[in-house]
Amino acid sequence: MEFPELETNRLILREIKEDDAEDLFKNFSDDRVMQHYGSEKMTQIEETVGLIHSFKMNYIENKGFRWGIQIKGQSRLIGTVGFHAWSSKNRRAEIGYELHSDYWGKGYAQESISRALEFGLNEMDLMRIGAVVFLENGQSNELLVKLGFQKEGILKNYIIQNGVSYDTYIYSKVRG
């Protein structure tokens, strides 16, 4: 199956290629972007190439989809959005996303996540889409609620980042 390309009014969600490593390295090495991401920031571009390969393997092995977010008419990626922990048997997956901080507050996250959710519910036939978010990540918590996610509770000591253990909220969007 060919990797699905998705569009919104302003964005193209497309397959991430090795040529995108420099763009994604700008995200995954940025302190602000990585503050609530759940893993340490990257220090070498080779780490980003490895991440791109893991995105591709998740797709090949039917474990997930991860799209690069590109503004129409531009070539660079400004972030990623997609699904991981995909269980087709149980019709569920978790959504993840990040956006370079230069593009925060412009509606790109909402636009790209909305389109990914539509794909997940309609094309992947998911019954449940989960999201795990740091308690301290106010913008992401607000965005998920705006997109129709329900807060289910707190996962205690769920993510360790830079040697510190964090509690997270768990959200879900279920098919009605």
Image (cartoon, rainbow, N blue to C red):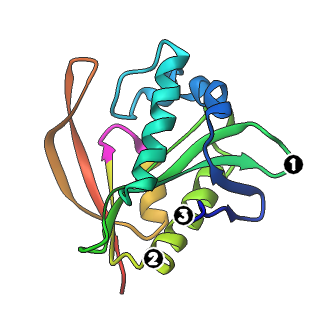
From the top left corner, tell me how far across and down residue 37 is, in percent. Answer: 39, 35
Please tell me which residue is depicted at 30% across the width and 74% down the height of the picture: 91
Q: Earlier in the sequence, mark 2 or mark 1?
A: 1
Crowd around label 2: few <14 · some 14–19 · many ≥20 (10 Å): some
Chain part drawn in magenta: 133-138
Please tell me which residue is depicted at 30% across the width and 60% down the height of the picture: 171
The one nearer the camera, 25 or 104, is 25
From the top left corner, tell me how far across and down residue 143 is, in percent. Answer: 48, 56
Helix, strand or loop under label 3: helix
Please tell me which residue is depicted at 68% across the width and 32% down the height of the picture: 19
Please tell me which residue is depicted at 66% across the width and 39% down the height of the picture: 78
The answer to whether residue 125 is seen in the rendering is yes
Q: Which residue is mark 1?
A: 73
Distance in Å between CA atoms under marks 3 and 1: 20 Å
- Does residue 135 belong to the magenta stretch? yes
From the top left corner, tell me how far across and down residue 170 is, in percent. Answer: 25, 55
Marking on residue 116: 3
Q: Which residue is mark 2?
A: 121
The one nearer the camera, 133 or 64, is 64
Distance in Å between CA atoms under marks 3 and 2: 9 Å
Q: Earlier in the sequence, mark 3 or mark 2?
A: 3
Crowd around label 1: few <14 · some 14–19 · many ≥20 (10 Å): few
142 w.r.t. 41: above or below:
below
Q: Amino acid at mark 3?
A: Ala
Viewport quadrant of the N terminus:
bottom right
110 w.r.t. 163: above or below:
below
The one nearer the camera, 12 or 35, is 12
Q: Residue furthest right?
A: 73
